[in-house]
Image (cartoon, rainbow, N blue to C red):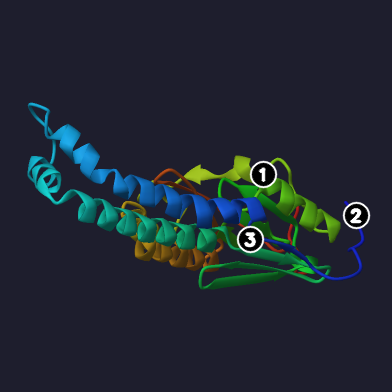
Protein backbone atom coordinates (compact mmCIF):
# COMPACT_ATOMS: atom_id res chain seq x y z
CA UNK A 1 0.00 0.00 0.00
CA UNK A 2 1.40 3.39 -0.98
CA UNK A 3 1.83 6.03 1.67
CA UNK A 4 0.75 9.62 1.36
CA UNK A 5 3.54 12.02 0.52
CA UNK A 6 4.93 13.72 3.63
CA UNK A 7 3.62 17.20 4.22
CA UNK A 8 6.14 19.94 3.48
CA UNK A 9 7.04 22.58 5.99
CA UNK A 10 7.70 22.50 9.68
CA UNK A 11 7.08 19.66 12.09
CA UNK A 12 3.79 19.10 13.88
CA UNK A 13 4.01 19.13 17.68
CA UNK A 14 1.31 17.34 19.69
CA UNK A 15 1.34 18.44 23.33
CA UNK A 16 -1.28 18.80 26.07
CA UNK A 17 -3.99 21.23 24.94
CA UNK A 18 -4.26 24.59 26.69
CA UNK A 19 -7.53 23.56 28.33
CA UNK A 20 -5.90 20.40 29.69
CA UNK A 21 -2.97 22.36 31.08
CA UNK A 22 -5.31 24.89 32.70
CA UNK A 23 -7.23 22.03 34.31
CA UNK A 24 -4.04 20.38 35.55
CA UNK A 25 -2.22 23.47 36.82
CA UNK A 26 -5.31 25.37 37.98
CA UNK A 27 -7.94 22.80 38.84
CA UNK A 28 -5.83 20.21 40.68
CA UNK A 29 -4.10 22.68 43.06
CA UNK A 30 -7.43 24.44 43.71
CA UNK A 31 -9.18 21.15 44.43
CA UNK A 32 -6.33 20.10 46.71
CA UNK A 33 -6.48 23.37 48.63
CA UNK A 34 -10.25 23.12 49.11
CA UNK A 35 -10.08 19.50 50.28
CA UNK A 36 -7.19 20.33 52.61
CA UNK A 37 -9.11 23.22 54.14
CA UNK A 38 -12.12 20.95 54.71
CA UNK A 39 -10.07 18.18 56.31
CA UNK A 40 -10.81 19.32 59.88
CA UNK A 41 -14.54 19.54 59.13
CA UNK A 42 -14.44 15.99 57.77
CA UNK A 43 -12.49 14.77 60.81
CA UNK A 44 -15.00 16.40 63.19
CA UNK A 45 -17.86 14.70 61.37
CA UNK A 46 -16.15 11.29 61.39
CA UNK A 47 -15.38 11.68 65.10
CA UNK A 48 -19.13 11.59 65.84
CA UNK A 49 -19.47 8.11 64.37
CA UNK A 50 -19.63 5.18 66.81
CA UNK A 51 -16.86 3.54 64.78
CA UNK A 52 -14.56 5.02 62.18
CA UNK A 53 -11.41 3.87 60.39
CA UNK A 54 -8.18 5.61 61.43
CA UNK A 55 -9.84 6.63 64.67
CA UNK A 56 -6.63 7.93 66.25
CA UNK A 57 -5.67 10.35 63.43
CA UNK A 58 -9.31 11.44 63.06
CA UNK A 59 -9.59 12.27 66.77
CA UNK A 60 -6.25 14.12 66.68
CA UNK A 61 -7.19 16.29 63.67
CA UNK A 62 -10.62 17.08 65.10
CA UNK A 63 -9.05 18.52 68.30
CA UNK A 64 -6.44 20.71 66.56
CA UNK A 65 -6.85 24.53 66.53
CA UNK A 66 -9.39 25.49 63.88
CA UNK A 67 -7.82 28.30 61.83
CA UNK A 68 -4.19 27.06 61.74
CA UNK A 69 -5.36 23.55 60.84
CA UNK A 70 -7.50 24.80 57.96
CA UNK A 71 -4.73 27.03 56.63
CA UNK A 72 -2.14 24.27 56.97
CA UNK A 73 -4.47 21.78 55.28
CA UNK A 74 -5.07 24.16 52.38
CA UNK A 75 -1.31 24.65 51.88
CA UNK A 76 -0.63 20.91 51.97
CA UNK A 77 -3.50 20.28 49.54
CA UNK A 78 -2.23 23.00 47.21
CA UNK A 79 1.26 21.46 47.12
CA UNK A 80 -0.20 17.99 46.53
CA UNK A 81 -2.24 19.36 43.62
CA UNK A 82 0.86 20.94 42.07
CA UNK A 83 2.72 17.63 42.37
CA UNK A 84 -0.14 15.79 40.67
CA UNK A 85 -0.17 18.41 37.90
CA UNK A 86 3.57 17.94 37.37
CA UNK A 87 3.14 14.17 37.15
CA UNK A 88 0.19 14.55 34.76
CA UNK A 89 2.10 16.83 32.38
CA UNK A 90 5.12 14.53 32.47
CA UNK A 91 3.00 11.48 31.62
CA UNK A 92 1.23 13.30 28.78
CA UNK A 93 4.52 14.03 27.07
CA UNK A 94 5.11 15.59 23.66
CA UNK A 95 5.15 14.03 20.19
CA UNK A 96 6.95 15.85 17.37
CA UNK A 97 6.34 14.58 13.82
CA UNK A 98 7.83 15.60 10.49
CA UNK A 99 8.29 13.91 7.12
CA UNK A 100 11.52 12.23 8.18
CA UNK A 101 11.25 11.38 11.85
CA UNK A 102 8.94 11.25 14.84
CA UNK A 103 10.12 11.91 18.40
CA UNK A 104 8.19 10.89 21.51
CA UNK A 105 9.25 12.56 24.78
CA UNK A 106 7.78 11.69 28.16
CA UNK A 107 9.47 12.52 31.43
CA UNK A 108 13.17 11.74 31.03
CA UNK A 109 12.60 9.30 28.16
CA UNK A 110 13.05 10.17 24.49
CA UNK A 111 12.28 7.74 21.65
CA UNK A 112 12.73 8.51 17.94
CA UNK A 113 11.88 6.54 14.81
CA UNK A 114 12.17 7.31 11.11
CA UNK A 115 9.16 7.38 8.81
CA UNK A 116 10.92 5.13 6.28
CA UNK A 117 11.16 2.35 8.92
CA UNK A 118 7.52 2.37 10.03
CA UNK A 119 4.99 -0.22 8.86
CA UNK A 120 2.27 0.87 11.31
CA UNK A 121 1.77 3.43 14.07
CA UNK A 122 -1.18 3.36 16.43
CA UNK A 123 -2.35 3.98 19.98
CA UNK A 124 -3.18 0.96 22.09
CA UNK A 125 -4.62 1.90 25.44
CA UNK A 126 -2.22 4.53 26.76
CA UNK A 127 0.74 3.38 24.64
CA UNK A 128 1.75 5.00 21.37
CA UNK A 129 3.35 2.21 19.32
CA UNK A 130 5.34 2.17 16.07
CA UNK A 131 6.09 -1.11 14.29
CA UNK A 132 8.95 -1.73 11.88
CA UNK A 133 9.03 -3.68 8.60
CA UNK A 134 9.24 -7.04 10.43
CA UNK A 135 6.47 -6.00 12.84
CA UNK A 136 9.12 -5.40 15.52
CA UNK A 137 8.34 -2.65 18.01
CA UNK A 138 10.37 0.41 17.06
CA UNK A 139 8.85 2.50 19.83
CA UNK A 140 6.28 2.15 22.57
CA UNK A 141 5.63 4.97 25.00
CA UNK A 142 2.77 5.65 27.40
CA UNK A 143 1.08 9.00 26.76
CA UNK A 144 -2.21 10.65 27.67
CA UNK A 145 -2.27 12.65 24.42
CA UNK A 146 -5.52 12.43 22.46
CA UNK A 147 -5.49 9.68 19.81
CA UNK A 148 -7.34 11.87 17.28
CA UNK A 149 -4.71 14.59 17.47
CA UNK A 150 -1.92 12.02 17.16
CA UNK A 151 -3.61 10.42 14.15
CA UNK A 152 -3.95 13.79 12.41
CA UNK A 153 -0.27 14.61 12.99
CA UNK A 154 1.04 11.28 11.70
CA UNK A 155 -1.26 11.20 8.69
CA UNK A 156 -0.31 14.76 7.78
CA UNK A 157 3.30 13.68 7.40
CA UNK A 158 2.59 10.41 5.58
CA UNK A 159 2.93 7.84 8.37
CA UNK A 160 0.79 4.68 8.16
CA UNK A 161 -1.53 5.37 11.09
CA UNK A 162 -3.72 2.39 12.06
CA UNK A 163 -7.13 3.43 13.35
CA UNK A 164 -8.03 -0.10 14.43
CA UNK A 165 -5.00 -0.57 16.65
CA UNK A 166 -2.38 -3.30 16.41
CA UNK A 167 -2.51 -5.06 13.00
CA UNK A 168 -0.88 -8.10 14.65
CA UNK A 169 -3.37 -8.36 17.52
CA UNK A 170 -4.51 -11.85 16.47
CA UNK A 171 -0.95 -13.23 16.71
CA UNK A 172 -0.45 -12.74 20.45
CA UNK A 173 -0.39 -15.66 22.87
CA UNK A 174 -0.57 -15.59 26.63
CA UNK A 175 2.75 -16.15 28.37
CA UNK A 176 2.76 -19.32 30.45
CA UNK A 177 5.89 -20.31 32.29
CA UNK A 178 7.61 -23.32 30.70
CA UNK A 179 5.85 -23.22 27.32
CA UNK A 180 8.28 -24.96 24.91
CA UNK A 181 7.99 -22.32 22.15
CA UNK A 182 10.16 -19.91 24.17
CA UNK A 183 13.80 -20.19 25.23
CA UNK A 184 14.95 -20.38 28.84
CA UNK A 185 16.30 -16.83 28.49
CA UNK A 186 12.92 -15.55 27.33
CA UNK A 187 11.13 -17.31 30.19
CA UNK A 188 13.57 -15.76 32.67
CA UNK A 189 12.86 -12.27 31.31
CA UNK A 190 9.11 -12.87 31.31
CA UNK A 191 9.24 -14.11 34.93
CA UNK A 192 11.23 -11.05 36.03
CA UNK A 193 8.83 -8.79 34.17
CA UNK A 194 5.83 -10.49 35.80
CA UNK A 195 7.31 -9.63 39.21
CA UNK A 196 7.79 -6.00 38.13
CA UNK A 197 4.19 -5.78 36.89
CA UNK A 198 2.88 -6.92 40.26
CA UNK A 199 4.58 -3.95 41.95
CA UNK A 200 3.55 -0.30 41.93
CA UNK A 201 5.67 2.78 41.41
CA UNK A 202 7.87 4.35 38.76
CA UNK A 203 10.84 2.05 39.41
CA UNK A 204 8.74 -1.05 38.75
CA UNK A 205 7.29 0.51 35.59
CA UNK A 206 10.81 1.37 34.38
CA UNK A 207 11.96 -2.20 35.05
CA UNK A 208 9.00 -3.58 33.08
CA UNK A 209 9.85 -1.36 30.08
CA UNK A 210 13.53 -2.32 30.19
CA UNK A 211 12.61 -6.01 30.28
CA UNK A 212 10.24 -5.45 27.34
CA UNK A 213 13.21 -4.05 25.40
CA UNK A 214 15.32 -7.10 26.32
CA UNK A 215 12.59 -9.41 25.05
CA UNK A 216 12.53 -7.34 21.86
CA UNK A 217 16.19 -8.21 21.32
CA UNK A 218 15.12 -11.88 21.34
CA UNK A 219 12.62 -11.19 18.56
CA UNK A 220 9.54 -11.00 20.80
CA UNK A 221 6.90 -8.29 21.08
CA UNK A 222 5.03 -8.00 24.38
CA UNK A 223 1.68 -6.48 25.27
CA UNK A 224 -0.01 -6.33 28.66
CA UNK A 225 -3.62 -6.76 29.66
CA UNK A 226 -3.87 -5.71 33.29
CA UNK A 227 -1.02 -7.74 34.86
CA UNK A 228 -1.04 -10.53 32.25
CA UNK A 229 1.63 -10.69 29.52
CA UNK A 230 0.97 -11.69 25.92
CA UNK A 231 3.65 -12.20 23.29
CA UNK A 232 4.26 -12.80 19.61
CA UNK A 233 7.35 -13.36 17.47
CA UNK A 234 8.40 -10.80 14.88
CA UNK A 235 8.27 -11.77 11.20
CA UNK A 236 11.32 -13.68 9.89
CA UNK A 237 13.59 -12.23 7.24
CA UNK A 238 13.49 -13.61 3.73
CA UNK A 239 16.61 -14.17 1.59
CA UNK A 240 16.62 -10.53 0.48
CA UNK A 241 16.81 -9.29 4.10
CA UNK A 242 13.26 -7.94 4.22
CA UNK A 243 10.32 -9.25 6.19
CA UNK A 244 8.85 -12.47 4.89
CA UNK A 245 5.15 -12.64 4.02
CA UNK A 246 4.99 -16.14 5.45
CA UNK A 247 3.88 -19.37 3.72
Q: Residue 145, percent across and down? A: 62, 53
Q: Name the image quarter holding residue 11.
A: bottom right
Q: Give the total number of marks visible in the rendering.
A: 3
54 or 101: nearer the viewer: 54
Instruction: For label 2, count other residues whose C-alpha is less than 10 Å away and answer few (under 14), some (14-19) or many (20+).
Output: few
| Mark nearer the N terminus (3 vs 2) | 2
Determine the CA span between mark 1 and mark 2: 19 Å
Outermost residue to the front: 67
- What residue is disc 2 on? 2
Judging from the image, what secondary structure is the residue with disc 1 in?
loop
| Mark nearer the N terminus (1 vs 2) | 2
The label shown at residue 136 is 3
- What residue is disc 1 on? 165
Q: Name the image quarter holding residue 52.
A: top left
Q: Is residue 32 left or right of residue 247?
A: left
178 or 217: nearer the viewer: 217
Judging from the image, what secondary structure is the residue with disc 2 in?
loop
Amino acid sequence: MERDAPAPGKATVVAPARSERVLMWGGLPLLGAVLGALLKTLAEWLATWPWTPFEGPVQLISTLPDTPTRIGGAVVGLVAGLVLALIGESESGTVTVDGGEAVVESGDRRVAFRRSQVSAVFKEGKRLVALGPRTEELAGQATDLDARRLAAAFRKHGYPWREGGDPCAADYRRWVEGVPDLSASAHGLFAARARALRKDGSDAARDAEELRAELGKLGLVVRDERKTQYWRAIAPRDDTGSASEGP
